[in-house]
Amino acid sequence: MQSLQHKASEWSGVPSDEAFAIDDTNRFLKLGLQTFINLSTNFYNRVYDDDEEWFRSIFADSEKQNAIQNQYEFFVQRMGGPPLFSQRRGHPALIGRHRPFPVTHEAAERWLHHMQQALDSTPDIDDDSKIKMQNFFRHTAYFLVAGNELKKQNEQMPCKHAAGSDNS
Ligand code: HEM
């Protein structure tokens, strides 16, 4: 079976080494906390205002301010800053945390559309960081799609007792 990383690269069109070039500089030191807060605020303002109800509704059970904080604390931690996310929420385990949500190819493209607009309209993000973040987000979004497909496959798999008793 292809690994999730492999699928993420194939579906996103971003090879793993390009996605992880996010780590070639400490983005937190370069951009600062406020830029990450601004980026996540900008992103979630777009998500919660989305005209596409099917996408907006994925976030219906989350409070916007909370979602903003969860996201920027993860970005800060992942991009070289203090472990704010883990201190408050525990291990990131992104596939597990997205388990309740329909993370389809279509949802990934919508998420990336809003993130692209947020990156383009948040001041103080240099071009290099923008490109590296785009690649990292694209790869991660499809990594989550791959995790979601695996979840669906596992749900369809009958349990061993059911398989054993099915003589039809
Ligand atoms: C692919 C499409 C995606 C969908 C549909 C999606 C959906 C969601 C939803 C509905 C939440 C709950 C909001 C909250 O309460 O915090 C969430 C949380 C989160 N997402 Fe995503 N997401 C996607 C992609 C991503 C990507 C690409 C990343 C990282 C680069 C990411 C990182 C996070 C983080 C860190 C949280 C907070 C988790 C927590 O604190 O429990 N998501 N996402």
Image (cartoon, helix red, strand yellow):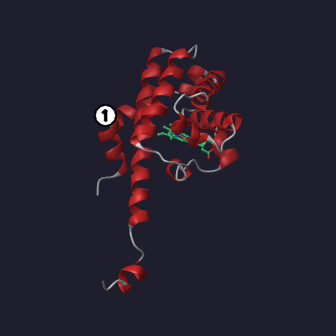
Helix, strand or loop at disc 1?
loop
Q: Position of residue 128 (x, y in %)?
A: 44, 18
Q: Is residue 23 visible?
A: no
Q: In this rendering, would 124 be left or right of 165?
A: right
Give the quarter the ligand 1 occupies: top right
| Vertical comparison of 42 with 13: above or below | above
Which residue is at 45% across, 45% downward?
Answer: 144
Q: Position of residue 116 (x, y in %)?
A: 47, 23
Camera-side residue: 118 or 166?
Answer: 166
**Around disc 1, counting alpha carbons within 10 Å, would you say few (fewer than 14), some (14 to 19), or many (20 or more)?**
few
Which residue is at 54% across, 32% downward?
Answer: 79
For badge 1, the amino acid type reads Gly
Q: In this rendering, would 110 be left or right of 18?
A: right
Which residue is at 33% across, 33% downward?
Answer: 14
Q: In this rendering, would 44 be left or right of 151?
A: right
Q: Position of residue 42 (x, y in %)?
A: 61, 23
Camera-side residue: 57 or 90?
Answer: 57
Q: Quadrant of residue 157?
A: bottom left
Q: Position of residue 113 (x, y in %)?
A: 46, 27
Instruction: Find disc 1 in the rendering and name its residue.
Output: 13
